[in-house]
Image (cartoon, grey):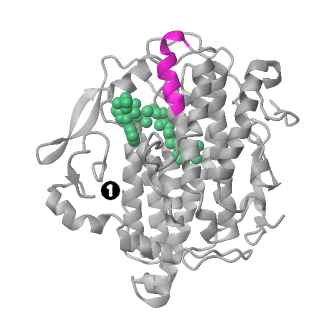
Amino acid sequence: MAIDYIERIPNNVHLSENRRLQRALEEWQPKFIDWWKEMGPEGFQMRDVYLRTAVSVDAKGWAQFGYVKMPDYRWGIFLAEPEADRRIAFGDHKGEKAWQEVPGEYRGVLRRLIVTQGDTEPASVEQQRLLGQTCPSLYDLRNLFQVNVEEGRHLWAMVYLLDAYFGRDGREEAEALLQRRSGDQDKPRILGAFNEKTPDWLSFFMFTYFTDRDGKYQLASLAESGFDPLSRTCRFMLTEEAHHMFVGETGIGRIIQRTCELMREHGTEDVARHGGIPLQLLQKYLNFHFSVSLDLFGSELSTNAANYYTMGLKGRFEETRKDDDHRLVDAVYPVWEADADRLRQIEAPALTALNERLRDDYIADCAKGVLRWNRVIEKAGIDFALKLPHRAFHRAIGNFADIRVTPEGQIISQAEWDRRHREWLPDERDHAFIASLMRPVTEPGKFAGWIAPPARGINNQPVDFQYVRQA
Ligand code: BYC
Ligand code: FE
Ligand code: FE
């Protein structure tokens, strides 16, 4: 299905046939642009950036590449193609026709899910807004902006649903999405990780690896929704999400590669003196970003999650590929909890354990990339392996929020935690060191000393392509 680019708001939802909706979105559009100018990337707004723009929802080719100034990016509304006679795949309504309108009794719950999803998108742009000033290369700068404009489009995706299906309440929520601010004391973003700082590129790559990957799993669960417009919206968002995680995985991989080169060249682990990032320090950043991202899955046992499922609003990862009754009323699922001084697994009702199940899928996916990173270290002949910390480590939500746990999964006292947490999480000195490495490199084909060049450029362009240029 082609996208109409003549219209002010590119879309494949026949916006021109719905005057009320068109007016609501056209009223929101200038507010979005104001927000983008205030809270989007600082500087660079008048530069030409070599960006990918969605132009169709075709599996064979949905994107077009070319120079665009970010404020002129064609943010639009794209839903994946409808599936003929799609049925609700799980919960109480299993087998019924998927909904094209919001079921009245689920209105509040569904709105809340959409708002929570929508809130993360502008939050991440806000978190990343200063990074352009310290880019390690033009290639990386372009990738940052690509991620930023697409998160902006993800906000559009949720605002479309709010405006199209939730009337006045939806319009109010759409406004509020532009008013909350990441890290703000009075009007913070909704979820914890989206109020943390992303002050440097190491954090950015960790964020796009670990936190955008939460996006993948949450979007995949919402793509199973019985509310068909949400499902179709999320299915298209997932195609964009893959690039965000690619940026994270290859970014960390390139840092590791550079660190290994420096270790071999200088015959020392202490590459900090040579302008590299020590593997131990990478491990600390990994520990931080993994643990705050685990919190994004919610409590291990959640009646909210059970309700979302039973109501047919949010499924499991790859729900339709699972071979069970898709109701889970009598099923059980293993869940971790703390029992006095040790961690153990108990059998919990599968319905209330759905957050934990999604977290399990997520952890398994995270582990694959860590294996690939470790192969880079191994190839360099270095005896070191990065590890995911235990799921109970450094948690603020759920069963482990009130206890202290080592990365190996040992419960410890607050006093021991206070003594030792600097071994496991970056402290002020680590942050200051990383900050000291963040010097902009903007000559085409040149890279900061702490990161290796990528194996290849974007869209078959060479690595030394002018990915961002003066207009
Ligand atoms: N921080 O019953 P529980 C992305 C609240 S990322 C703060 O366990 P539930 C992206 C919770 O709201 C994907 N509060 O919660 C990535 C509840 O509040 P109430 C984002 C939290 O509802 C990178 C209470 O604690 N999408 O797209 O089962 C860049 C009890 O918790 C947190 C979604 O998240 C937290 N971490 O699960 C850009 C999908 N966790 O009821 C974008 C939509 C929980 O007591 N959201 N709470 O007031 C959901 O499905 C669910 O809301 C959650 C939470 C899975 C997040
Ligand atoms: Fe997103
Ligand atoms: Fe993303």
Q: Could you tell me which residue is drawn at 31 percent across and 35 percent down?
A: 300
Asked if residue 396 lies left or right of residue 74, the reply is: left
Instruction: Please say if 424 is above or below 293.
Output: below
Secondary element under disc 1, as helix, strand or loop, is loop
Quadrant occupied by the N terminus: top right
Q: Quadrant of residue 236?
A: top right
* Residue 360 in magenta stretch: no
Q: Quadrant of residue 86?
A: top right
Residue furthest to the bottom in view is 266
Q: In which quarter of the image is residue 471?
A: bottom right
Give the total number of marks visible in the rendering: 1
Of residue 365 and residue 123, the one placed in the foreground of this image is 123
> What percent of the width, then of the height, locates residue 230?
60, 26
* Region in magenta: 103-115
Of residue 120 and residue 405, the one placed in the foreground of this image is 120
Instruction: Please say if 456 is above or below 78.
Output: below
Instruction: Please say if 374 is above or below 10.
Output: below
